[in-house]
Structure formats: C-alpha cells, structure tokens
Amino acid sequence: MTELQAGQGAQPLEVPRIDARPQRYRDVLIALAAFALLALLPFIFGSKQLLDFVIRCAAYGLFATSLNLLVGYTGLISFGHGMFFGLGAYGFGLMMQKTGVAIPVAFVATLAMTFVVAVVIGAICVRLKEIYFAFVTLAFQMLIHSTILSWQSLTGGDQGLRGGIPRPPFLGIDLSNHLHLYITSCALLVIGLFLMRQIAQSPFGYTLRMIRDNATRASFIGIDVWRAKLTIFVLAALFAATGGMIMALFVSGAYPEFAYWTISGEGIFINMLGGVTTFLGPMVGTMLFLILNDTVTRLTEYHGIVLGIVILFFAIGLRKGLMDFAVEWFAQRRGEGRG
Amino acid sequence: MLKIRDLSKSFGGVKATDNVSLDFADGSLTAVIGPNGAGKSTFFNLITGALRPDAGQILLNGVDMAGKTPPEIVRHGIGRAFQVASIFPSLTVEETMLAAVCADQRRAGVMHRRFPLAETRDRAEHAMELLGLANKRNRTAATLSHGDQKLLDIALALVLEPKVLLLDEPTAGMGTEERWRMIDKVRELWEKQKITVVFIEHDMDIVFKIAPEIVVLCYGRILATGTPEAIRRNEAVIEAYLGSDDHAGAVA
C-alpha cells in the first residue's frame, strides 16, 4: 500500500485511514482459499510431478519467505540462513531414525533445537553491522556444514542420512502416502505463511521496518534494537527449519547440500527474483526459481551460467524482483486510469 | 528538573565537553549557542546516551542518566530530534507516529495483533495535529519536503510525551522565512506542551528573539549563561563569539 500511496503523494487527499481488523480477516480468507485450492489440485490434475513441485515450493517457499523477514523487513542480509534449513532436515531426520518418536513430537523437538541454536548464533551475529553480519552468518553456516560432514557416525558424513526416514502414521495421517504428504506440506506452507504475514503486519513488524529504515532513530524512540533483531532472527530460523523438515520428508533423507552455503545463496537468489518489497515476492521467486532450475537442468549442463544470466537480468535490467515490478506496473496503470 | 553535573567527554586529547554543569528548570526554554566545534552536539549526544560520558552526572528528577542506553533514557523522558532529520523513509507519516506510540507503550514487540493498535491512535493524531502534518498523513516520509521532514523528526520525539525535548538545530538547512516558521512552531509547542525544551541554534536573531535562557558553549566549556540581555553584554561572549560575527554591530 505504501508504495501506491507514495506514487500519488502530491495530493493531500483524505485517503481512508489504515485499519487493522479487516486486514486480518482478509488474510484468514486468503489463507483458507489458498489451502482449499491446493488441496483440490490433486483431484483436478493427477500429475505426481505437479504435486512434487508444490511440495518443493512449500519447503523452499517457507525458507525464502522467512529469509525475507530478515532481508526485506529488517534489513539483515543473512548469508547463512540455509543453516537452519539444514538443521531442520537433519534434526528431524535423525530424531525419526534414532528415537522413533511420533512425527509431531520430532517436529516440535526439532523446532526447539533450532530455537536454542538460533538464539546462540543470533546473539553473536545481530550485534554486527551489515557486511560483518553477512559474513559471520556465512561462517556459522560453514561450521555447521563441516560438522555434518565430519561427524560421520551420527550424520553419515558426505553420504547424508540414508536408509530413509521412518514415517509412522499419526492421527490418521500417513506421510509415506504421497497425497497425505502433499496435503500436510500445503498445510504447513499456508500456516507458516499466515504466521509470517501476521508477524509482518503486527506492531513488531513495524518495529522491524523502523530498524531497517533507521536503526539509530529506532533506538531513540525507545526500541531495543538488539532484542528485536534477535527475536526476528530466531523466528525466521524456525520457519526455515520447518522448510527443511518438509524437504527431509519429501526426499526421505537429509544431505549435506541442505546445509551448504549454496542453500543460503539460493535463498538470496529467490528473494532477488521475486522481490523483497512485497510479502509474497519470495513465494513467486521460489516458483520461478524451481521452474528455472528444473527446465534449465534438463536442457543444459551449464545451468549455472543460465541462472547467472537470469539474475543479472533481474539485478541490472529490472533492478527489482518480479513482484516489485508487477506491483509498480499495476500502480502506474491505476494512476493512468484515474488521471 | 534536568541537572547536569561536571559532565566531561574527550576524544583523543580533545575535550569536547569539559566539566559542564547546568540546570534546566521544568518548563524552561533554553537555546544553546556556540561556534562550530564548541561541543553543542556532543553535549546533546551525552545527555541522550548516544555517547557515554567520561565523567559527570545527568540527573533527570534526581535519576542519573549517565551510562544508560538511548532507549532507557528515552523511556525516562528525554526525547530528541536531530540536526539532519532522522526519520523512517519508507513509512508514512501516520505509520511513523503510530509505531512510535507503540514503542512508548512498550508494545513494539506485540505480534498477535495487527498494526496499528487502536490505543495508539489518539496520541498519534494529536502529535500530527500539533506539528501540522495531519493532512500529509499518508505520504511516505521520503517524499516530504525538507521542512516537513524536520517537523516529522520533532513529532517523533514529541509523540513520546517527553519531559525534556532536545532539538539539535531545528532550523538547519532552511531558508530565512522557513526558519522563522519553524522557530515559531517550536515556541508554540513549548508553550502548549509545557515541557522543558533545549535547542541548538546558529541564527543569533532567532536566539535573542525567542529564548528566555541562553547557554554559550566554547571549546566544550560553558562561556556564559543567562538571559538574552545578559548574553549580549557579556564581554567574554562578545570576544569569543559574537565579536567575530556579523552581529557585532547589533551587539554593541
């Protein structure tokens, strides 16, 4: 909304004031509609490939959107966000393989573990200024990756967690059934997105925007900047870990690549593709990225070059993500229609 | 009552604030003047916690602020505006005000409700009315004129309902006419809000016209304090500051 209003800023017209409550109802409706649509998909198109695509979108989408809470909303450019994706996948996979607890228990336990790790790493990182923050998060990512590689007895080293992740049914949900896994992934995606949207549109979300815009000023109106940054760092880690768990369930395993720095790089890439000024930008970016990845890998072995060119096009050509571009385009058209 | 006692701060060998002791009575309006590099901004930075004093006390109603962080000091009731308008470029005027009230109500961390909270509205509205920004409520801060950005900066401090308001050059970067409008606004706020206002100002005409109390800083030390009349006649001030200025004629 703010972008739209900035465009027509010259007229000091009485525009309707921001109101909080209808927004939440609207978001609940959108979430329900999205879930219903996704849940109907398998009954309209039987294609397993399409459902696989949606599951991967759920895993990467939660990861990329949570990264946008840091990058777009708070101005914290993390190059190590992928470590929590990896932690989620490994934590969940190991818990299921070694302890045999019920899936919801492993899910919550993995989130608890991620919470502790994120608090420790966040407490060290969020004090640092931009570039140092980026590099120290990257360093932690590398640390976790090498720990996974070298702790062979637990993690299987570079082979990853093999032998499949046991998926005992719970509450009538059997995650070894592809349809059940699909519906569960969609539910996690929609709930995750709704919660992140709630955070972004809450008073705390505006605190984050203030910190992004001008952290010094934020501290001079009484905001504890360090605490707010740590809070969002930890929350974003939890959503990224949820993405990792979906991935682990999907491939029935966990591999060192899930915790490698390239995952973080892909997260940034996705955010650049989709754009960081809208909430759904990273989701659009995720779909774009996965489609690109799948088609390009099928066509050429030099897919790195193609992806590189694409990102150059977005960075230098459009200078913004696809969603940013779309929003501005619509705003312009609307403006013309009115004038 | 804001009492400064023996406040000192050095950068390397330079004493930016040197043993400054001052009293600001409740509801007073004081101008801080002094040549460039006199330590005016450092003085403000010490009081608001942007810098940590080497020594001395900053007593607000008997509570020492020295060594506290900016958020703590703000919550005790010392608000400030900046020389270069310090605002949130991507937020609208209204959002800025609402978010600031949220912070003041200790609700900056609330996640289970939507922004804006109904209980922040009246105060935000009041601050926008006071500063004449109500009809620009939906403009993003980045699109405001320079003068409006300065007003928004002041509104940000004022909306927190501080006991003491520190304004670092409210008229910086403005044309003559705009300066007078701004300073009238400052005076109006001071009269309406009945708070303690301390402001830094370079324009002597403005200072002598509106400030009942003046503090002259020079090389980090207090050169003189007093009413405009007393400052005009002060030998040390004339020599160190006014004498070298275009205002020499007016002073003599």
Image (spheres, coloured by chain):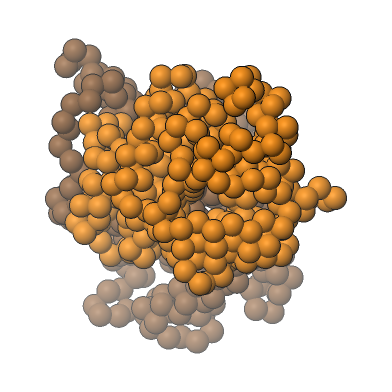
Chain colours: A brown, B orange
A209 in relation to A272, above or below: below
B3 in relation to A115, above or below: above
Report x, y in % for residue B129. Answer: 24, 40
Residue A311 in which image quadrant: top right
A48 in relation to B69, above or below: above
Residue closer to the observer: A40 or B101: B101
Residue closer to the observer: A221 or B40: B40
Report x, y in % for residue A95. Answer: 50, 80
Residue closer to the observer: B166 or B89: B166
Left or right, residue A12 beside residue B49: left
Report x, y in % for residue A44. Answer: 18, 47
Left or right, residue A302 beside residue A239: right
Q: Residue at x 34, y 70 (%)?
A: A175
Q: Residue at x 67, y 60 (%)?
A: B7
Q: Residue at x 24, y 36 (%)?
A: B134
- Can residue B125 be spotted in the picture? yes
Residue A177 in which image quadrant: bottom left
Left or right, residue B153 beside residue B83: left
How many numbered circles does the render carry? 0
- Can residue A273 be spotted in the picture? no
